[in-house]
Amino acid sequence: MALALGHADRGRLLMEVLLLGTGAADGVPNLFCRCATCTDYRERGELRTPTSALVDGRLLIDPGPEAPRQVARLGRDLVGLDAVVVGHVHDDHLDPAVLLHRSWVTAAPLEVAGPAPVVAWARQWLDADQTAVTFRTVTAGEEFELAGYRITALPANHEAFGEALCYLVGDGTSTLLYASDTGLLPEAAWELLGGRRVDLVLLEETFGTRSDKGDQHLRLDTFAATVARLREVGAADEVTRVVAVHLGHDNPPLAGLRAELARCGAEAVPDGTAIVV
């Protein structure tokens, strides 16, 4: 899905964000469930696989165990991949086998960035003397260059056996906010977002209508509150596109979900959607 381009947009480079997956860790439908939402997806033949995004074919965010097949099913490849950025150590956000399989094919340099637990976990999968994959440990509040992008690490509200991060990704023209997984963002994240306008927000919305599953993920009401605050602090405006990701089966069936998200100016899109920013 590509946005229509105005005359002012033509002739300059744009950021493409390819949503490899838009689902929670267990995807939708959950194989062990026959709730209304899982049944709706089965009957329509739609799958949501774990959330992952590919930016301009160069930067891969949160490659879980399904990421290689997600790319292949869309007719793409990762030959031009320069870097990987990971939010936290849970396996739906990084399957280190992806790095191992790449090392079997090419020695071209690849940089992997993430909090300390991610780096420690991924290193175990690679030979100690290999040089094809390098690692960068980042922490909340840090700004760094990666694959030609300026990235800011934001603190997430998520228990993940160590630090969990969300990311602002900018190419000098457009900016993406990737916020998955997290509950309501910590105040330190809002301080980092203050005064920084975002073109595209990928914001997790895992728990839907459930309020009994803790505060480490967003649900429909806290998702809407987060979108409202993004607008209050100037990070989002009337042309910022807000897309719900990391969607779980505790959400209503698709038609109802879209209606609920529309109330706060957000949307749900299928796996495989390409958004041109």
Image: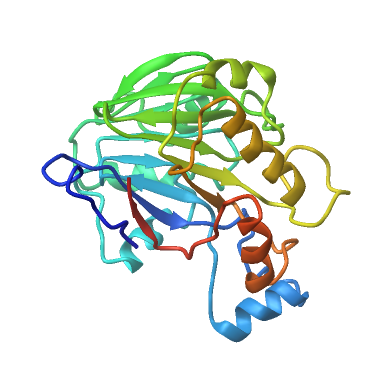
Considering every residue shown, the one lying at the far right of the view is 212
Q: Position of residue 90 (x, y in %)?
A: 60, 40
The answer to whether residue 196 is seen in the rendering is: yes
Asked whether, in this view, residue 103 is left or right of residue 169, the answer is left
Count how many numbered circles sit on residues in the image. Answer: 0
Residue that lies at the very extreme toward the left in this rendered image:
11
Q: Residue 269, percent across and down?
A: 49, 62
The location of residue 183, given as percent across then percent down, is 71, 36
Q: At which x and y percent is residue 233? A: 58, 24
Residue at horizontal 26 percent and vertical 50 percent from the top: 78
Q: In front here: 180 or 257?
A: 257
For the C terminus, the quadrant is top left
Q: Nearer the viewer, residue 168 or 164?
A: 168
Q: How is the image coloured?
A: rainbow
Image height check: is 121 above or below 39?
A: above
For the question of whether residue 140 can be seen, the reply is no
Looking at the rendering, which quadrant does residue 154 occupy?
Answer: top right
Q: Quadrant of residue 67?
A: bottom left
Q: Nearer the viewer, residue 257 or 148?
A: 257
Relative to 261, say whether 74 is above or below.
below
Residue drawn at x 41%, y 48% is: 53
Give 36 or 90, whichever is nearer the viewer.
Answer: 36
- In the rendered image of this protein, does residue 251 appear above or below residue 230? below
* Residue 82 higher or lower than 24, as above or below: above
- Please identify the quadrant where the N terminus is shown: bottom left
